[in-house]
Image: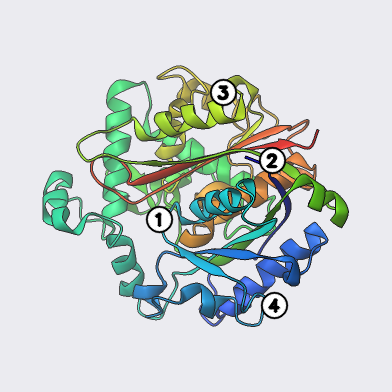
Amino acid sequence: MRDVVVAGVGMTEFGRFVDRTFPSLVGEATGAAFRDAGAEAGDVEVVLYSNSGAGLVQGQESVRGQHAVRGSGLEGVPLINVENACASGSTAVNQAWLAVASGQVDVAVAVGAEKLNHTDRTRAFAAMLSALDQDRLEEIRAELGSAGSGSVFMDIYARYAQWYRDRTDATPEDFARIAVKNHAHGALNPKAQYGGALTVDEVLAARRISGDLTLLMCAPMSDGAAAAVLTTPERAQRWGAEPVRLLATVIGAGRAGVYGELVPRTAERAYAMAGLGPGDVDVVECHDAASPAELIVTEELGLCPPGGATGLLRDGATTLGGRIPINPSGGLGSKGHPVGATGLGQLVELADQLRGRCGARQVDGARIGLAENAGGYVGPDAAAATVTILGTAR
């Protein structure tokens, strides 16, 4: 397999954009990625387009990507539609990597977009619900009990939070600290949906959603797009790009009846592919659709021993300026969670961190970045997870 680099990245703001179209969002994100890479749309040989909810939210099925790239210069380029729940964006990156690494193409673009905000909010909730095993839907609801959040996924995260509390010293205050930290990070990110100063008391006093989860611990419904140009080191040099190396991209799938092994298994394969270990990682973007997930994933990635994530949080190790900053972008809770673009948004943040482009939220000396992106539910674990590792150019 050939070496692959990320030559350019781009993204829109994440937020609520009911009146914007998919072509508008995708055109902005891909245009920014092309400018970053020094490339043109005509250089692209394949497009991997990720989206999760357009079928149920907008009624756009089957040709989602062909619709979304209209006007971007990518019309007519071979295009593959990618859907893998909340891990769709990073899955598109994996498939773009494979196309370049295998020698099938020299230039691939992964682009993801989502519009979850709609005048009919029930459509977005229906899209989220579709990421569960429909044959087991009533069984899953019975397992979760009558939490009544209106969002089955927040009920799932509340269950994970309780399990985590049962085996560690974590408290609801720790879950609130994650939200406080990430909103402070998000305030430094001009592309973030939310950001600003919060207190632990404010987070705990917010409207209760499910179990220990309050509104300020939960990722919002978001719209937005993000893109990355993948190519060979030689082509990136010819363009005059400032690339980062794509050291590992691994997809894992959950197994029904098994909990807590999907992310560790996927991370282990990613570390092996990159020839690195958890101690080599300088900055992390993880899938914190609810705040407790950050603590759980910190341990699943091997960044600390089991039960040690609360200590890292309380000591400030995962805050900007700490030993291993996690979610400097603001994470899903602050930056936003436009499902099909979420994994690519993580990649944009890491590529910019490794190139020293993040301004006030820059992680000093960052050379290795890791992203964990997960989605769907097979019960009791997620249906899909990816771990992607980037490194600075040699």
Question: Given this view, does label 3 or label 1 mark the residue nearer the observer?
Answer: 1
Is residue 255 or residue 75 the one in the foreground?
A: 75
Q: Quadrant of residue 117?
A: bottom left
Q: Earlier in the sequence, mark 2 or mark 1?
A: 2
Q: Considering the numbered disc 2 on the image, is that residue within a helix, a strand or a loop?
A: loop
Q: Considering the numbered disc 1 on the image, is that residue within a helix, a strand or a loop?
A: loop
Position in image of residue 53 (x %, y %): 40, 68
Q: Earlier in the sequence, mark 4 or mark 2?
A: 2
Identify the residue shown where x is 58% and y is 60%: 193
Q: Residues within 10 Å of mark 3 (few under 14, many from 20)?
A: some
Identify the residue shown where x is 39% and y is 76%: 61
Q: Is 384 above or below relative to 105? A: above
* Residue 73 - label: 4
Q: Are marks 3 and 1 in contact (CB under 8 Å)?
A: no
Question: Given this view, does label 2 or label 3 mark the residue nearer the observer?
Answer: 2
* In this picture, residue 10 sits left or right of residue 334: right
Q: Earlier in the sequence, mark 4 or mark 3?
A: 4
The CA span between labels 3 and 1 is 26 Å
Q: Earlier in the sequence, mark 2 or mark 3?
A: 2
Question: Given this view, does label 4 or label 2 mark the residue nearer the observer?
Answer: 2
Amino acid on which the number 3 mark rests in the picture: Pro
The CA span between labels 4 and 3 is 40 Å
Question: Given this view, does label 2 or label 1 mark the residue nearer the observer?
Answer: 2
Amino acid on which the number 1 mark rests in the picture: Asn
Which residue in the protein does label 3 denote? 278
Which residue in the protein does label 2 denote? 3
The CA span between labels 2 and 1 is 25 Å
Which residue in the protein does label 1 denote? 84
The CA span between labels 2 and 3 is 22 Å
Q: Are marks 1 and 4 in contact (CB under 8 Å)?
A: no
